[in-house]
Image (cartoon, rainbow, N blue to C red):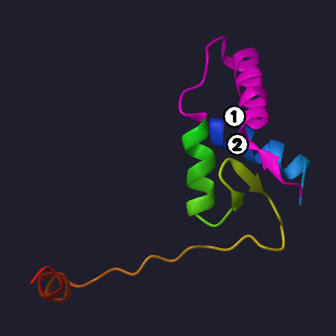
Amino acid sequence: MAKSIADLIMEYFKKHPRQDLPHGPVVDWVEKQYLKLYRRKPRDTWRQIRKFHQEGKLMKIRKGIYRYDPDYVKEVELFVFSTDAKEKIFE
């Protein structure tokens, strides 16, 4: 089964639960694994880490430091506005 950049990132964080991890070493590890699998460098590894934070899968402790806590993981639910509501907001 092929592993995506996202899969590799979560694999790393799950191996280090409840630890404050700077994203530099995470990116280095993911790039190394990705190179082994696909013989090319991955793109936007840092962006995927930030995306996981926005989705509620990682906690941002401070700039560049993230934590995976299996008890914290939450689904972020986005509210969908109706067309009428959008028009009133823009007014």
Q: Is residue 56 magenta?
A: no
Q: Pick the quarter of the image with the C terminus.
A: bottom left
User: Looking at the image, which is closer to me, 38 or 29?
Assistant: 29
Label 2, on which residue? Answer: 7
Horizontal side of residue 21 vs 50, given as left or right: right
Q: Disc 2 residue type?
A: Asp
User: Within the image, what quadrant is residue 70 found in?
Assistant: bottom right
User: Within the image, what quadrant is residue 85 found in?
Assistant: bottom left
Horizontal side of residue 44 vs 32, given as left or right: left
Give the class, few, some or many, for how many residues have Cα within 10 Å of label 1's Cα (few <14, many ≥20).
few
Label 1, on which residue? Answer: 3
Q: Disc 1 residue type?
A: Lys
At 78% from the left and 73% from the top, the residue drawn is 72
> Which SS type dominates the magenta stretch?
helix
Q: Are marks 1 and 2 in contact (CB under 8 Å)?
A: yes
Identify the element where label 1 is drawn: loop
Query: Magenta residues?
Result: 19-45
Give the class, few, some or many, for how many residues have Cα within 10 Å of label 2's Cα (few <14, many ≥20).
few
Q: Pick the quarter of the image with the N terminus.
A: top right
At 79% from the left and 29% from the top, the residue drawn is 29
Q: Is residue 14 above or below residue 30?
A: below
Task: Give the x, y percent position of residue 12.
Answer: 82, 42
User: Within the image, what quadrant is residue 47 found in?
Assistant: top right
User: Looking at the image, which is closer to me, 3 or 43?
Assistant: 43
For the question of whether residue 58 can be seen, the reply is no
At 73% from the left and 19% from the top, the residue drawn is 37
At 58% from the left and 63% from the top, the residue drawn is 55
Task: Give the x, y percent position of residue 10.
Answer: 75, 48
Furthest residue toward front: 63
